[in-house]
Image (cartoon, rainbow, N blue to C red):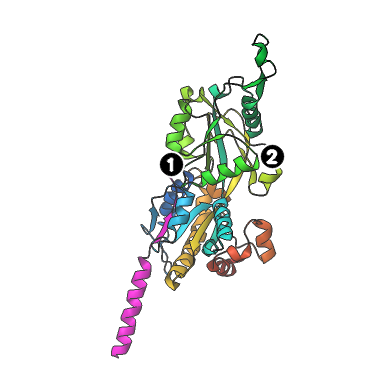
Amino acid sequence: MRKSILCLALALLFSAMQANAQVNILGGVPGGTYDKMIRELDKALGKVQREGKTLSLNNVTLSDSKGSFYNYVHLKNSENHLALMQFDVLQYQRGLDLDAGTEDANHYKVVMPFGEEEIHIFMNRASDPHNLVHNLDDLRQLIEASEEPEKAAEDSKPEDKGKTARKKRKRIRVAMGSNMQGTYITASNLKQKLELNWTEAKMGFNHSWRELINGKIDVLIFVGSAPVEALRKISPEVKDKIKMIGIASNPELDKIYTPAIISSNRYSWLDEDVQTYAVPTVLVSYDKNESESHTQLISNFLDVLHEQLPAIQEDQFTYHPAWQKVNMLYELDSPDAFLAAYPYIPLWMYHKTTFDFVKRNRK
């Protein structure tokens, strides 16, 4: 009898612990896409009150974050269960692991794709007074023109004839995000793949935005799902000082990113659509020495998100447009279907709870 009572008490205690379980998610910089989506997720999942689910009001918590690379570093902390990050950050870290002969990056598992974020590129109009730059290919030409040698003047001294001199133009200075942001990885890829010889400026968005407006930098690169909250409204005075430029189609970039359009209806100040690329976003867990309770928490999180996602996607006036691209994967009925839908994610890279969830919810 006592044994039965003890077992019942332990079961009730475990149930209470589960009911109060918290899933801690690393989001993004304040005002960015990740930050807004996780705050919306907290609000949405807080509405779910159903027996057997471990998530309810006030138990989706958001950790302060400085960006995707910050999330990559801090996801190992046992207090953090999940993190949003750019997929190119994972690719970059896997490359470093291969070079170093380590395998730590292999423990970062994709729980589910989480949409994508467009590459936003802004330029100070004073840096392009003739309005010749409309995309990064044009920017390359501007950079190369500033580095071209010019012949010595006709009225120069005889001994100077035939000599060349560099034009006295400033180098193009580009803000690429801070070291902790995924933007820096994306901007570095653009610089390398498109062979752009600009001067790097490592700084966060708020700082670089002020520097761009004040003409201290020429170009700013930022990755975020349009419309980025911090960019929704721009005053006429600021609009007169800056413009958005795009990225022309490029075979090398097609291997890494998805062609995308930043529509003019996403930002009231944008006069026309801008061709660019989008960076896949993934929800990630770190599975090295992962406990059973950690695994179960992720599984329960997927169940509750699955229940609430249709309402989130239907209420387009309340939630960020990026939710429209979030896919719970349960319609993918085979490994080939997974690879066809998300060719950039190898099957081994998915978290073990993902396939269990798909089997439970497959229609």
Residue 119 appears at what percent x and percent y?
57, 40
Q: Is residue 230 above or below residue 234?
A: below
Depth order, front residue of 284/186: 186
Identify the image quadrant of the N terminus.
bottom left
The structure residue drawn at horizontal position 58% and vertical position 47%, both measured from the top left corner, is 279
Depth order, front residue of 145/222: 145
According to the picture, the residue beneath numbered tag 2 turns out to be 249
- Residue 7 within the segment the image draws in magenta: yes
Q: Residue furthest top?
A: 155
Bounds of the magenta segment? 1-30
Q: Which mark is residue 276?
A: none
Residue 250 appears at what percent x and percent y?
69, 41
Q: Is residue 76 visible?
A: yes
Q: Residue furthest bottom?
A: 1
The structure residue drawn at horizontal position 48% and vertical position 68%, both measured from the top left corner, is 288
Question: Left of 243 or right of it: where is 60?
Answer: left
Q: Name the kind of residue labelled 1 in the image.
A: Gly
According to the picture, the residue beneath numbered tag 1 turns out to be 31
Depth order, front residue of 165/208: 165
For mark 2, give the secondary structure.
loop
The structure residue drawn at horizontal position 64% and vertical position 62%, both measured from the top left corner, is 332
For mark 1, give the secondary structure.
loop
Identify the image quadrant of the C terminus.
bottom right
Q: Name the kind of residue labelled 2 in the image.
A: Ser
